[in-house]
Image (cartoon, helix red, strand yellow):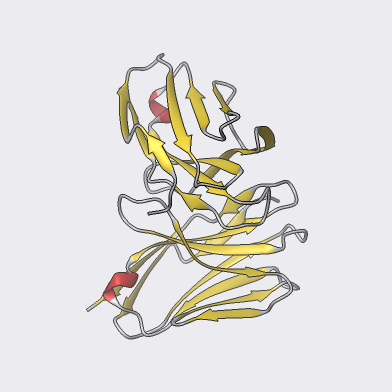
Amino acid sequence: GENVEQHPSTLSVQEGDSAVIKCTYSDSASNYFPWYKQELGKGPQLIIDIRSNVGEKKDQRIAVTLNKTAKHFSLHITETQPEDSAVYFCARGSSASKIIFGSGTRLSIRP
Amino acid sequence: DSGVTQTPKHLITATGQRVTLRCSPRSGDLSVYWYQQSLDQGLQFLIHYYNGEERAKGNILERFSAQQFPDLHSELNLSSLELGDSALYFCASSALDRDSPLHFGNGTRLTVT
């Protein structure tokens, strides 16, 4: 199908610990997998993206891994900080010129 | 600042009415996407335009329509409004017609009473 399944829907971690959010998809034609962060009252903002010719990509404390065979990709945030608290969305591109979003994960960082 | 401008920020209207939401894309971007976000929900894809042409449609209701003008700004028209249409409507722009980063505006919050 077209949907992207995202888990968990809520996640609470201790400041300094790591957070992992996972997404799965079924359209094998997808080649582009972005992640967005949405803070309260704002539009989503791209934080990292990965294309299907790459298995992993890292940007400071954020990393994304992609397993195209298994059709799943994950966001890893290390050394979490209070400002990481937000809603995170995975998404996938499609051959039909759509970008389909997961249902979101509300991440809370406990002090 | 994403460079994407959406107006108005807030809109309150009654059932049965019609409204128009406006989006100005980031300078140089040819693609405009529209998404609907209901309370505590994800981003539902509505429609995508590239350089004035419709590229893809999502689960957009027949009461909703959109267009992209020659200056690349876009409008989303919502008619015969129902209570369930109350939501945040986001516009996003992108440089290419597929598989490229989206830059979101801050949304229009529509309340139907």
Left or right: residue A17 versus residue A31 is left
Q: Seen from this angle, which residue lies furthest left? A: A111
Viewer-proximal residue among A6 and B47 = B47
Dividing the picture into quadrants, the one containing residue A24 is bottom right
Left or right: residue A70 versus residue B108 is right
Viewer-proximal residue among B102 and A30 = B102
x and y percent of residue B105 in the render? Answer: 42, 46
Q: How many marks?
A: 0
x and y percent of residue B21 in the render? Answer: 43, 29
Residue in the image at 58% along x and 32% along y: B60
Above or below: residue B38 compared with residue A107: above
Left or right: residue B39 versus residue B98 is left
Above or below: residue B68 compared with residue A27: above
Dividing the picture into quadrants, the one containing residue A14 is bottom left
Left or right: residue A102 versus residue B38 is right
Viewer-proximal residue among A79 and B31 = B31
Dividing the picture into quadrants, the one containing residue B100 is bottom right
Residue in the image at 69% along x and 77% along y: A54
x and y percent of residue B55 in the render? Answer: 69, 38
Quadrant of the frame with the C terminus of chain A: bottom left
x and y percent of residue A84 in the render? Answer: 34, 71
